[in-house]
Image: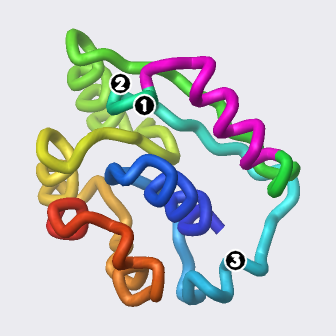
Amino acid sequence: MKKKTVWFFAMLSAAFLAACGGSSQSVEQQEEVVEEDTELTLWTFPVGNWGKPATVANMLADFHKAYPGIHISVEYLNYENGDEKVSQAAASGDLPDLILEGPERLVANWGEEGWMVDLSDLWESERAGAIYENVKEA
């Protein structure tokens, strides 16, 4: 279920997400599965318009119309203290479900640290062509 949410954010932002969750189902199978009353937490760095609460609220409003049972709370990080907040959360085992950050900075390191779910099955989807190569590498 959370891979479906990851796909939504990946396609919407063309940036990489560090995400938690997953299952053995394919992306296509998961598109048909919507769990009710699912709570997710998103921390976002100001990548593109993701630092603008009004823009994010509009995107989430559209998402919530399609998936009313999935509730996403957002916390906005900045480059002055966001890295430290993520590091502390990882050390305490209290990471959010989703983190939006560009692949060229921290995300590649997060994978090396084992903080990310393997999303390589997403690259096999017919929609994977919309994902930048540096995002896949990260």
State the scheme by which the image is colored: rainbow
In front: 107, or 12? 12
**What quarter of the picture does the C terminus occupy?**
bottom left
Q: Position of residue 118 (x, y in %)?
A: 34, 72
Residue beneath the point at 77% across and 50% down: 70
Q: Are marks 2 and 1 in contact (CB under 8 Å)?
A: yes
Of helix, strand and loop, which one carries label 3? loop
Q: Which mark is residue 31?
A: 3
Q: Is residue 10 magenta?
A: no
Q: Is residue 53 magenta?
A: yes
Q: Which residue is mark 1?
A: 44
31 horizontally vs 122: left or right: right
Of helix, strand and loop, which one carries label 1? strand
Could you tell me the amino acid type at mark 2?
A: Pro
Q: Which mark is residue 46?
A: 2
Query: Spatial distance from mark 1 to mark 3, Cα to Cα?
Result: 24 Å
| 25 is higher (above) or lower (below) than 117 | below
**What quarter of the picture does the N terminus occupy?**
bottom right
| 50 is higher (above) or lower (below) than 4 | above
Query: Spatial distance from mark 2 to mark 1, Cα to Cα?
Result: 6 Å
Read off the magenta span: 51-64
Q: Position of residue 10 (x, y in %)?
A: 44, 57
